[in-house]
Image (cartoon, rainbow, N blue to C red):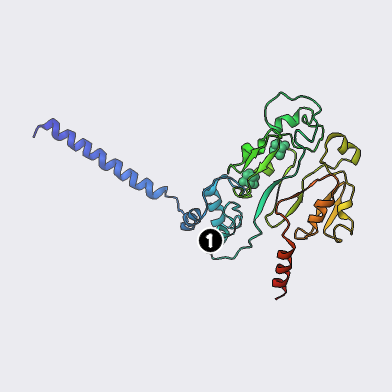
């Protein structure tokens, strides 16, 4: 054999052996132990990587859960099913809360609420809020620039023609991102079985509310009177009524009697016959 070819084969073979041995050593020396539970938990998660659990993504959440650093029920998009699956992988039990949905707590769109100036800056609610508290004359009202809509990772929101965000309930996973995005505290999560909610967060007094918005709550307190709702169903907190009994059918009466029309009905009131049947079923 040609001596040059032979020496090349020997040199290259030697180098191959050397690098192979180095790689084998490194793979043992720097091996990272991966808890098999992390892989199992990751497979059980929906893979939305939305951050609703408080971690940067599903992998980070799976790791934290496997280490016992965070509970197995923090994945909102996964809901009760995923929480139970993750808990089963860990061999623990977990509490599962009622499913929730995002709601828009303001009805003061272009037609109902006035602006105090024309805003022509960055089309972002947080940026607008920094310029004189935003253009909306109501210092609590929706600024209408849709930051919540853009932040929603599930395409579960859109802006309507009246300049207000709308939640598509079927798509909402209650990830909470719109809630943390809104600089006005307009977005909130409520239990899906809550039929009626108050769509106003203004703590202003009646005169101030009426001067800027036609649908703002002006704290007349009619909804908390015993003629409308039983004691404890709704209570005043400052200038705003707060719903305490989310299951009360009298919330529909509050909606009907509210002179400012500040309540919103998510789920239509059942027909009287259906209510009677439900009561009979509950008694059996
Ligand atoms: S509407 Fe809000 S809570 Fe619902 S999926 Fe979108 S960002 Fe999440
Ligand atoms: S709800 Fe909040 S984030 Fe969404 S458009 Fe209104 S002010 Fe902006």
| Residue shown at the point (67%, 28%) measured from the top left | 123
Q: Quadrant of ligand 2?
A: top right
Looking at the rendering, in which quadrant would you find the N terminus? top left
| Residue shown at the point (81%, 41%) measured from the top left | 215
Q: Quadrant of residue 262?
A: top right
Q: In this orientation, which residue lies closer to the viewer: 59 or 44?
A: 44
| Residue shown at the point (82%, 55%) measured from the top left | 253
Looking at the rendering, in which quadrant would you find the C terminus? bottom right
Q: Which residue carries the number 1 mark? A: 85
Q: How many marks?
A: 1
Determine crowd level at label 1: few under 14, some 14-19, many 20+ residues with C-alpha closer than 10 A.
many
Task: Find residue 243 and report its horizontal and vertical position in percent.
Answer: 80, 54
Would residue 237 be found to the left or right of residue 44 on screen? right
Secondary structure under tag 1 reads helix
Q: Quadrant of residue 120?
A: top right
Task: Find residue 132 and report its horizontal and vertical position in percent.
Answer: 79, 28
| Residue shown at the point (71%, 71%) measured from the top left | 282
Q: Disc 1 beta carbon < 8 A from ligand 1?
A: no
């Amino acid at each position: 054999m040609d001596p040059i070819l032979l020496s090349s084969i020997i040199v290259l073979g030697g180098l191959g052996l050397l690098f192979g041995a180095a790689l084998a050593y490194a793979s043992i020396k720097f091996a990272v132990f991966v808890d098999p539970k992390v892989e199992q938990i990751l497979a059980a998660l929906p893979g939305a990587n939305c951050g609703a659990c408080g971690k940067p993504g599903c992998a980070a959440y799976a790791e934290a859960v496997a280490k016992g650093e965070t509970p197995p029920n923090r994945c909102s998009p996964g809901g009760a099913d995923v929480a139970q699956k993750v808990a089963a992988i860990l061999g623990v039990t977990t509490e599962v809360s009622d499913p929730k949905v995002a709601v828009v707590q303001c009805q003061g769109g272009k037609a109902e609420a006035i602006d105090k100036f024309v805003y022509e800056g960055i089309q972002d609610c947080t940026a607008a809020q920094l310029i004189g508290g935003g253009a909306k004359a109501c210092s609590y009202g929706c600024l209408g620039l849709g930051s919540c809509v853009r932040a929603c990772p599930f395409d579960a929101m859109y802006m309507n023609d009246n300049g207000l965000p709308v939640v598509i309930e079927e798509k909402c996973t209650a990830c909470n991102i719109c809630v943390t995005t809104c600089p006005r505290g307009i977005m909130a999560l409520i239990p899906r079985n809550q039929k009626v909610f108050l769509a106003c967060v203004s703590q202003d007094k009646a005169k101030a509310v009426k001067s800027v918005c036609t649908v703002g709550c002006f704290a007349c307190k009619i909804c908390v009177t015993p003629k409308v709702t039983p004691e404890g169903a709704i209570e005043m907190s400052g200038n705003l009524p707060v719903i305490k009994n989310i299951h009360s059918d009298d919330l529909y009466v509050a909606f009907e009697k509210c002179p400012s029309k500040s309540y919103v009905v998510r789920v239509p009131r059942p027909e009287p016959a259906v209510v009677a049947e439900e009561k009979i079923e509950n008694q059996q």
